Amino acid sequence: MDNRFNPVELYPRARAWIVREQGGRRGIDVGTWDVLGSQAKWPMTNVRQLGLPQWRRLAADPGNRCLIPLTEFAEWTPDTHAVGGGKPIKGEMWFACTDQPIFAVAGFAQQIGDQLCWAMVTCDPNPLVAPFHPKAMITILDESDWDQWLCGSYDEAVILHRPVIVDGPLRRR
């Protein structure tokens, strides 16, 4: 497998590391950030409504669940916001989990032809993200929930589909 990619910046249809569990063993794979594998005009980079048939099918099989390791994430806002007492800013707002230099986001992965494809699971935004992106945020999992997401039943997994409080710095890159 060609595992060359830019691990610094993640963008739709780019390749990145994901963590999966198969046959009782956890490992790292390289996949493309578009769970539909370029079969649609626009990349499908996130999944929000886990009850829809196509996503329920993925969520029901633990073999389709993955973790996406990140060090930070951005939300884009067209509005100007006062942040940290400094000059008001707009555009990319960056968030990090200060207690976890690398954190995990719930995701789905599926094999399409010879390509492993994945998407992040999004949920309602928490109070920190909501002013910048009022519709959704990524589903950040506590490390204690990784096993439940990767190996649990459908009901055990979807209970984790909720916002987490991200206690971290907000900055513009």
Image (cartoon, rainbow, N blue to C red):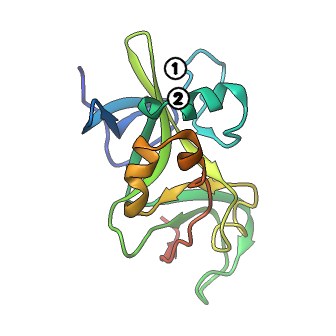
Determine whether the residue tagged by mark 1 lies in a helix, strand or loop.
loop
173 in relation to 165, above or below: above
Kindly identify which numbered label has been placed on residue 71.
none
Determine whether the residue tagged by mark 2 lies in a helix, strand or loop.
loop
Total of numbered circles in the picture? 2
User: What residue appears at the point 62 percent right and 59 percent down from the top-left corner?
Assistant: 162
Tell me if 49 is positioned left or right of 122 in this view: right
60 in relation to 145, above or below: above
What residue is pinned by disc 1? 37
Label 2 crowd (10 A; few <14 / some 14-19 / many >=20)? many
Residue 27 location (% of width, % of height)? 25, 38
What residue is pinned by disc 2? 34
Type of amino acid at the residue the image marks with label 1: Gly
Measured Cα–Cα span from mark 2 to mark 1:
5 Å
Q: Toward which corner of the image does residue 67 lie, by quadrant?
A: top left
User: What residue appears at the point 63 percent right and 56 percent down from the top-left corner?
Assistant: 137
User: What residue appears at the point 41 percent right and 46 percent down from the top-left corner?
Assistant: 68
Residue situated in front as seen by the camera: 145 or 155: 155
Tell me if 98 is positioned left or right of 57 in this view: left
Tell me if 157 is positioned left or right of 53 in this view: left
Q: Toward which corner of the image does residue 91 lie, by quadrant?
A: bottom right
Residue 9 location (% of width, % of height)? 40, 47
User: What residue appears at the point 68 percent right and 73 percent down from the top-left corner?
Assistant: 127
Type of amino acid at the residue the image marks with label 2: Asp
Residue 112 location (% of width, % of height)? 47, 15
Asked whether the beta carbons under mark 2 and mark 1 sit within 8 Å of each other, the answer is yes
153 in relation to 168, above or below: above
Label 1 crowd (10 A; few <14 / some 14-19 / many >=20)? many
Residue situated in front as seen by the camera: 125 or 13: 125
In which quadrant is the N terminus drawn? top left
